[in-house]
Image: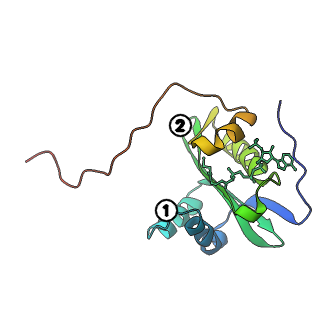
């Protein structure tokens, strides 16, 4: 069953805009993903129709979620809530809003990249396992063609 959350009044969740890029960068770094290309990744993304929401507590950004759409599949690629604001329902509401944004953009389904700590969080939101394994490695730095 869909979870209905009642957030504290001081918490606001809204669509992210280009004006949030700077505040999002601080949280992005806090989420242990310092990245020089952050302003390009998120900044350009927000400008080109990427789905993104921010959570604010008394006007300060305390959480974000970012996703995108490829054909009819939506993905929530990042979701983060700063530790002192966890367990208030912010993550749940951000995920539900992202789901709805992706639906409005044309998604028929939504997938998430869960980690072992957040599996239960996603399962409570109705996500189920799909039998696949993600393998990664750094990109090739040379062409294989001589
Ligand atoms: C995953 C993450 C975004 C969740 O954010 P959050 O705001 O704490 O999420 P919620 O408060 O909605 O839910 C968290 C838990 O609090 C419980 N909860 C706390 N207060 C609640 C309330 N008022 N009403 C209902 N449930 C509440 C929920 O049941 C939930 O428990 P569960 O884990 O058993 O499902 C956050 O923990 C985080 O940023 N983690 C680090 C980054 C990360 O791992 N991101 C995910 C990559 S996939």
- Residue 121: % across, % down: 71, 41
What quarter of the picture does the N terminus occupy? top right
Q: Is mark 2 within 8 Å of ligand 1?
A: no
Residue pushed farthest left? Answer: 146
- Residue 126: % across, % down: 72, 32
Question: In the picture shown, does residue 94 fall above or below 99?
Answer: below
Question: In the picture shown, does residue 40 fall above or below 140?
Answer: below
Q: How many labels does the image show?
A: 2
Pointer 2: what residue? 71
Q: In this view, does 115 lie to the left or right of 127?
A: left
- Residue 67: % across, % down: 60, 49
- Residue 66: % across, % down: 61, 54
Closer to the camera in the image, 66 or 123? 123
Quadrant in which residue 53 is drawn: bottom right
Disc 2 packing (10 Å; few <14; some 14–19; many ≥20): few
Quadrant in which residue 14 is drawn: bottom right
Q: Could you tell me which residue is drawn at 49 percent across and 67 percent down?
A: 34
Distance Cα–Cα, label 2 vs label 1: 20 Å
Residue 41 tag number: 1
Q: Could you tell me which residue is drawn at 74 percent across and 51 percent down?
A: 91
């Amino acid at each position: 069953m869909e979870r209905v959350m009642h957030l504290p009044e001081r918490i606001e969740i809204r669509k992210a805009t280009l004006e949030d890029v700077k505040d999002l960068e601080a949280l992005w770094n806090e989420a242990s993903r310092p990245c020089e290309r952050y302003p390009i990744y998120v900044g350009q993304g927000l400008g080109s129709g990427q789905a993104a929401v921010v959570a604010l507590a008394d006007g300060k950004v305390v959480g974000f979620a970012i996703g995108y759409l490829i054909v009819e599949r939506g993905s929530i690629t990042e979701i983060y809530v700063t530790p002192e604001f966890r367990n208030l329902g912010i993550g749940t509401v951000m995920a539900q809003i992202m789901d709805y944004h992706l639906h409005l953009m044309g998604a028929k389904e939504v997938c998430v990249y869960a980690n072992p700590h957040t599996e239960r969080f996603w399962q409570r939101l109705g996500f189920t396992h799909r039998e696949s394994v993600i393998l990664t490695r750094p990109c090739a730095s040379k062409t294989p063609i001589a």
